[in-house]
Amino acid sequence: MKVQILKDNLAKALSVAGRVVSTRGSLEILSHILLSTEKGRLRVSATNLEIGINYWLGGKVEKEGDITIPARLFIDVINSISSEKIDLSVEELDVRVKSLNDNLVIKGISAEEFPVIPTIQGKPSFVVKSNVLKEALNLVNFAAAMEESRPVLSGIYFNLDGDKLILAATDSYRLAEYGLKLENKAEKKLEIIVPSRTMIELSRILADLDEEIKVFVNDNQILFSTKDIEFTSRLIEGQFPDYKQIIPKDNETKAVLESSEFTNALKVASLFARESANSINLVVKPKGEVEIKAVSAQIGESDTVLKAEVEGKEGEITFNGKYLLDVLNNLKAKTVSLEISGKLSPGVIRSEKSLDYVYIIMPLRS
Amino acid sequence: MKVQILKDNLAKALSVAGRVVSTRGSLEILSHILLSTEKGRLRVSATNLEIGINYWLGGKVEKEGDITIPARLFIDVINSISSEKIDLSVEELDVRVKSLNDNLVIKGISAEEFPVIPTIQGKPSFVVKSNVLKEALNLVNFAAAMEESRPVLSGIYFNLDGDKLILAATDSYRLAEYGLKLENKAEKKLEIIVPSRTMIELSRILADLDEEIKVFVNDNQILFSTKDIEFTSRLIEGQFPDYKQIIPKDNETKAVLESSEFTNALKVASLFARESANSINLVVKPKGEVEIKAVSAQIGESDTVLKAEVEGKEGEITFNGKYLLDVLNNLKAKTVSLEISGKLSPGVIRSEKSLDYVYIIMPLRS
């Protein structure tokens, strides 16, 4: 293999592929990155067996070939080199990295030992804009369960029907659902669950893109394809809970609050709620106020009163403050609405900016 | 106590005082900050028994008094509050924090339990500009020993004689010495050693200041006094090593290198020098080149050639790369000079920007 590439392009490819490299795995090959030439381009590949990434970049390919190289060392080397162009060449299992000033040799492992990253043939199941998918993922990812005692709850539910795609996640204490309209109708209906861990990585990659994403699905895998990147994830088997019935149809009390004020008030209250499993008490008053309180026997107490547009009767509820802060930190809206129906029914957060988004929080006993 | 203050001023005082608060100490009172009124101002005090900080800020004092308050909680609260003004009042041991929206109570401890932060009366030993002292500290601090097996090596040596102040530090593998000229002659000669840990904190505080610093010294303490802040540190007892004789008088080989190129080359070489205790080999060639090499049996090897202005004969030396990177990261000069005299004599780094600075590195066997 012999390739000349621009340093900045290689650094960008490595910053994407490097994210899925196993750092503490038992298999040495998974801490490596696969470099291979393909149709006049260099392909950079990485996998942790759950996610696979292929990243193609342009370059001058003088000799075809492939090799794997220790990811962490290679990334550090490329980021430290001060040169516009880099020559990569392979001599047996040695990768020679040449820049204007540097002449480096890094020992690799044969490309044959690298696991196959699955691909999916045929037509895409659906096509979606990168910024739309990114917003949807950012607003549902945090609601998935972190631990995997019930695997389906650690995933993001994708429900595709015609031109309607619904994403949902729940850890059973809160639920987030985002509905989006595709530009083209999908031929087949689809119901799958994708690990939220992999969707967090996808969302980070999407942050730098502005293009159409083609999405391919088979029985075990989902593949997101952009111009230069293929991102593959395994699917989670199982049935996603039938959550529709827990979304309240109406409410007794509604308050519209200024997001940043609400966020600051919750941050202050959280400081006093550490001993009480983050219990924060909210009282919505028809005179146009929301009172936010937390009490700690040891450190003290907080009481914050915010102005709000209130509809309906006075209402009170206690939430885990973290669940409120999670959604406020991701909703980029100027105001949010809080809808409640007494102390025992789930509360609802919506935003005027994302009309097809709904976030449900189960109340705590107060 | 009853005081009204601006939130931003209090947040700034807390960010300074908070740095010396003990977080894992056994004495609960050391995790607290002392608030006290003094001549119409609020004084914020913190100490870890090694460093003491008093920070005065203006405010409207309605009732004199004092109290201590848990530092971490108070800092988090003040940073989370969105209000321009804050009212602090004390009811027995409760501190009430009132802002536009918030009404908080934080439980404190009586001010009587807070340790006395020593002060020093009389005339200052010397006066120095904050930016001059900061540069000097930044260029010597990193050369002090991190561990305290020989306490004097974990300190910064201050040698004051007339209008000449010398700062020096050495961990016995490298030595940094910075000489500076004061605007006024000091009355008394002075030789003291101050813990480098406390000088790192002082340097961070100086970064935000542009004023004259008055420095007071007694047998056990040094006190740096600015307009609003008093910073006290204990001294280290003992005799600083007589290092003058190890500073080479001349050299056989001298190379002037571009600092950022040299830094990048050392970063690349360091990646290949991890197995060999960071050994990096330098060869200075009279044709105007410096070659920088590192070899690892396991991961590969690096070889970087930089252009340089070279005087004298060809020379070779091996250094711990970290010691070179430490000085390059702190010298803000466009070029640096490297002076060597064979493989076995100490090397010298100087910069045209800080003429009274010299940095000595002991060679490694290669």
Image: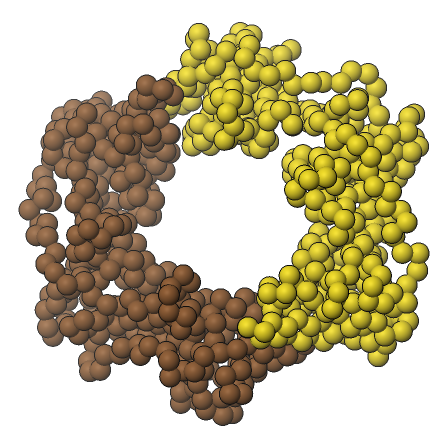
Chain colours: A yellow, B brown
On the image, the x and y values in percent for residue B223 come to 26, 72
On the image, the x and y values in percent for residue A259 come to 73, 62
Say above or below: B276 vs A328: above
Please state if A285 lies on the left or on the right of B191 as rendered. Answer: right
Is residue B5 visible from the viewing direction of this image? yes
Q: Total marks drawn? A: 0
Please state if A231 lies on the left or on the right of B365 as rendered. Answer: right
Please state if B128 lies on the left or on the right of A155 as rendered. Answer: left
Say above or below: B99 vs A32: below
Residue A350 appears in which quarter of the rendering?
Answer: bottom right
In the displayed orientation, state which residue is furthest to the bottom.
Answer: B63
Query: Which residue is nearer to you in this view: A304 or B111?
Result: B111
Q: Quadrant of the image for the C terminus of chain B? A: top left
On the image, the x and y values in percent for residue B85 come to 58, 79
Is residue B131 visible from the viewing direction of this image? no
Q: Residue at x 41, y 19 (%)?
A: A106
Residue B280 appears in which quarter of the rendering?
Answer: top left
Q: Residue at x 21, y 71 (%)?
A: B221
On the image, the x and y values in percent for residue B98 come to 61, 80
